Amino acid sequence: MIFSLPTFTVIHVVLSLVAIFAGLVVVGGLVAGKSLRRGTAVFLATTVLTNVTGFGFPFVTLLPSHIIAIVSLIVLPLVIAARYWKHLAGPWRRVYIVGSVATLYLNVFVLVVQLFQRIPGLIVAAPTQKEPPFMLTQLIVLALFVWLGRAALKGFSAQSVAMAEADSVMMAR
């Protein structure tokens, strides 16, 4: 390993938090009908790096966090292709929106798990993460992301996509 484990952990955590923050900004933009180019690039890059660096920690068996990272790493190329190669045309708009919201949700899901493993009050409330406080928290997070996904699909209409692409072309000139 190039870095010490504590340094590597800090890098991974910072990437994760930047990915979550940028993802919330991007999804908020989608809900408002806006395509945020820089925010999208930051979100996608840091989300890929978060998932990849998750495999850099020592492990003996495949963990649930690895499975979540694998799922995210399967979805992310579709999101990237939809945004950058297919330019959100036709069904690729939905792929981009649903994939972005889904990968952000997976990051937040892992964040909630980590919080329940590290914050003393949450450890007491759900020591095995099978208790009602943990399950209820994850259910609320899931419901919020379903709502966000629906709002993003409604807010980022085909007209928004056309306007975003026209802005991209104008900025490239």
Image: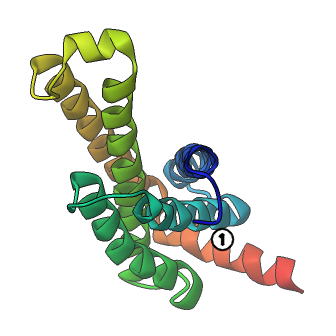
**Residue 153 seen in render:** no
- Residue at left 57%, top 53%? 26
Residue situated in front as seen by the camera: 48 or 85? 48
- Residue at left 20%, top 61%? 61
- Residue at left 60%, top 46%? 25
Q: Position of residue 172 (x, y in %)?
A: 84, 83
Q: Is residue 168 left or right of residue 5?
A: right
Three-letter code, disc 1 = Ala
Q: Is residue 134 left or right of residue 147?
A: left
Residue situated in front as seen by the camera: 98 or 71? 71
Which color scheme did the rendering employ for the protein? Answer: rainbow
Q: Is residue 41 left or right of residue 50?
A: right
Residue at disc 1, secondary structure: helix
**Residue 129 seen in render:** yes
Q: Position of residue 67 (x, y in %)?
A: 24, 62
- Residue at left 51%, top 68%? 48
Residue situated in front as seen by the camera: 15 or 142? 15
Q: Position of residue 169 (x, y in %)?
A: 77, 84
Residue 112, image quadrant: top left
- Find disc 1 in the rendering and name its residue: 164
- Residue 133 vertical placement versus 153 (above, below): above
Question: Of all residues shown, which one is farthest toward the right?
Answer: 173
Residue situated in front as seen by the camera: 7 or 134? 7
